[in-house]
Image (spheres, helix red, strand yellow):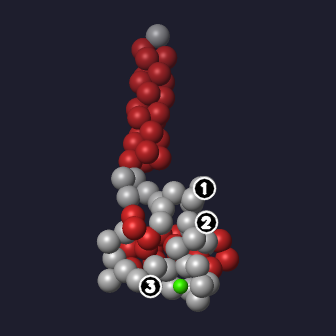
Amino acid sequence: MKKILYIIGGIIVLIIIVTFISGGGKGKIICSRNAYDCSDFSTQAEAQKAYEACGGVTDDIHRLDRDKDGVACENLP
Ligand SMILES: [Ca+2]
């Protein structure tokens, strides 16, 4: 009986850890849809990071690099 409680407890702990890891990234970058434009970033480097994280020039879902030169949001500081 005690063994079952340990197993259930272990499963609950595991679920909490998995939930924390998968949902815990506050700075997680969305790549599944067009979620950003250049005005969402305060610096070019930030925009570049999101742009590259989502696949860069071949998969510019957010259209951060309209001229497709590999540099996102050139107009940002
Ligand atoms: Ca560009």
Residue 37 position within the rendered picture, expressed as x and y whole percent measured from the top left: 47, 66
- Per the image, the residue denoted by label 2 is 61
State the separation of the CA atoms marked 3 and 1.
23 Å
The residue where tag 3 is placed is 74
> Residue 40 or 48: which is nearer the viewer?
40
Mark 3 Cβ inside 8 Å of ligand 1 = yes
Counting residues from the start of the chain, the first of labels 3 and 1 encountered is: 1
Residue type at tag 2 = Ile
Mark with earlier residue (3, 2): 2
Alpha carbons under labels 3 and 2: distance apart = 17 Å
Amino acid on which disc 3 is placed? Glu
Tell me the residue at 43%/57% (across/down): 28
Q: Residue at x 58, y 89 (%)?
A: 69
**Secondary-structure class at tag 2:** loop
Asked if disc 1 is less than 8 Å from ligand 1, the answer is no
Which kind of residue does numbered mark 1 sit on? Ser
Reading the image, the residue beneath label 1 is 32
Crowding near the residue tagged with mark 1, few <14, some 14–19, many ≥20 C-alpha atoms within 10 Å: few
Q: Earlier in the sequence, mark 1 or mark 2?
A: 1
Q: Tell me if 27 is positioned left or right of 53 in this view.
A: left
Q: Residue at x 41, y 83 (%)?
A: 75
Callout 3 secondary element: loop
The image shows residue 9 at horizontal and vertical percentages of 42, 24
The answer to whether any part of residue 46 appears in the image is: yes
**Secondary structure under the numbered disc 1 in the rendered image:** loop
Q: At 39% from the left edge and 64% from the top edge, which residue is drawn? A: 40
